[in-house]
């Protein structure tokens, strides 16, 4: 069967208040912020926060702090980049090395993901690529890396952006709205999210949050790839090979988009058994996975989300059980997901 993947479409559940949604192209994708109309000025300021983050974490803007670090391997201290790298180091440890931002030595330097022209590196080049999270050094004056290391923060940057905007809106006493950076979403109030397969043009599930401040992150093999679709951008840092076990990973938790963005990236390249064991230990993170055969697995949902399974030709099953739960019928919606294959070209 064709690969199945998630499309996220958040539906805010508000009893009152007219809402305003504004969208800009930032951080290589479409960033949408929805708030009550009276907070239009706060939407403007939220975009400014995203722009500041982009100017620190971008690999595509040559003037961004990360781009300069990858070029010169030493820059003046930048608090945003320092925090993102410090968090990335902790996620490296928590995922047993499956989340490694020094994957840029492969994703950026060899494949050139996100650029106008991508390449298919040789096995020799992949094997020779140097990854070392311990090669990043931060002190109060500077940030530096070893000369043969390149950093790619694409696996956590959008989640980081969502968290920073959410923190700003909380300071403004705003508790209704949504922040969406492609597949990284923060629902400030209760919301519904449709999960859809475009191959059948069907929504196969609707997820409803049980708590406010729901963080959502999705990672998949279906949008960004090099010269062939097999060469997608989710690469196992331990083997330099693409992750093959899962087509799509969606995670749900409360108020921590950065962590689940990184975790979704790591789970996408883990061996299947290790990924499921990792998730089963994280009761604060709900998950819905689609494996390479199109099988849907989910778990840890009790306190976070309700899932309503819809009419679809696949079955849903809990990762810890062998029994299958047949889906219930409902009409489909036609949704779309922003293409983030070429961030430099997306605005065009």
Image (cartoon, rainbow, N blue to C red):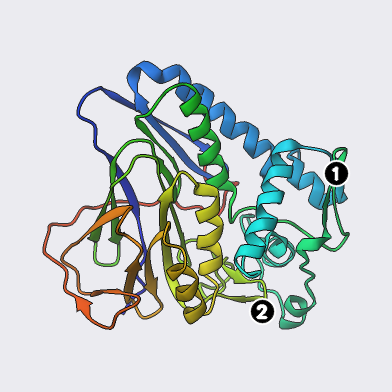
Residue drawn at x 83%, y 60% is 135
Quadrant placement of the N terminus: bottom left
On residue 171, the disc is: none
Residue 38 placement (x, y as % from top left): 36, 16
Q: Nearer the viewer, mark 2 or mark 1?
A: 1
Q: Is residue 170 above or below residue 345?
A: above
State which quadrant residue 35 falls in. top left
- Residue 18, image quadrant: top left
The foreground one among 237 and 224 is: 237
Q: Residues within 10 Å of mark 1 (few under 14, many from 20)?
A: few
Labels 2 & 1 near each other (Cβ < 8 A): no
In percent of width and height, residue 58 lies at 67, 45
Left or right of 50, for residue 84: right
Residue 214 lies, in percent from the top left, at 38, 45
Q: Badge 1 is on which residue?
A: 139
SS at circle 2: loop
In the displayed structure, would residue 216 be above or below residue 325?
A: above
User: Could you say which is closer to the camera, residue 342 or residue 35?
Assistant: 35
Pointer 2 local density, CA inside 10 Å: few below 14, some 14–19, many at least 20 = few
Residue at 66% x, 51% y is 87
**Where is residue 89 shown, x and y percent of the image?**
70, 57
Going by the image, does 237 lie left or right of 279? right
User: Which residue is identified by label 2?
Assistant: 239
Q: Measured along the vertical axis of the image, is residue 205 above or below residue 164?
A: below
Q: Earlier in the sequence, mark 2 or mark 1?
A: 1
């Amino acid at each position: 069967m064709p690969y199945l993947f998630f499309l996220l479409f958040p539906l805010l559940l508000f009893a009152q208040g007219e809402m305003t949604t504004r969208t800009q192209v930032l951080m290589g994708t479409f960033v949408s912020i929805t708030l009550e109309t009276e907070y239009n000025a706060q939407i403007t300021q939220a975009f400014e926060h995203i722009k500041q983050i982009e100017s620190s974490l971008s690999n595509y803007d040559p003037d961004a702090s990360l781009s300069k670090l990858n070029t010169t391997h030493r820059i003046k201290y930048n608090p945003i980049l320092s925090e993102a790298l410090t968090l990335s180091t902790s996620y490296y440890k928590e995922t047993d090395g499956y989340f490694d931002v020094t994957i840029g030595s492969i994703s950026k330097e060899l494949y050139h993901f996100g650029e106008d022209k991508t390449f298919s590196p040789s096995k020799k080049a992949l094997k020779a690529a140097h990854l070392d999270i311990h090669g990043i050094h931060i002190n109060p004056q500077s940030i530096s890396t070893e000369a043969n290391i390149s950093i790619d923060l694409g696996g956590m940057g959008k989640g980081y952006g969502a968290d920073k905007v959410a923190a700003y809106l909380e300071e403004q006493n705003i508790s209704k709205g949504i922040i969406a950076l492609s597949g990284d979403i923060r629902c400030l109030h209760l919301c519904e999210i449709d999960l859809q397969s475009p191959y059948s043009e069907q929504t196969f599930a609707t997820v409803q949050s049980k708590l406010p401040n729901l963080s959502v992150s999705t990672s998949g093999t279906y949008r960004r790839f090099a010269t062939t679709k097999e060469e997608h951008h989710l690469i196992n840092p331990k083997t330099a090979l693409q992750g093959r076990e899962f087509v799509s990973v969606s995670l749900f938790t409360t108020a921590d988009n950065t962590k689940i963005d990184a975790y979704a990236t790591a789970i996408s390249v883990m061996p299947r058994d290790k990924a499921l064991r990792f998730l089963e230990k994280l009761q604060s993170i709900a998950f819905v996975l689609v494996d390479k055969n199109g099988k849907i697995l989910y778990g840890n949902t009790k306190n976070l989300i309700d899932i309503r399974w819809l009419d679809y030709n696949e079955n849903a099953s809990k990762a810890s059980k062998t029994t299958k739960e047949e889906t219930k019928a409902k009409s489909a919606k036609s949704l779309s997901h922003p293409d983030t294959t070429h961030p430099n070209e997306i605005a065009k």
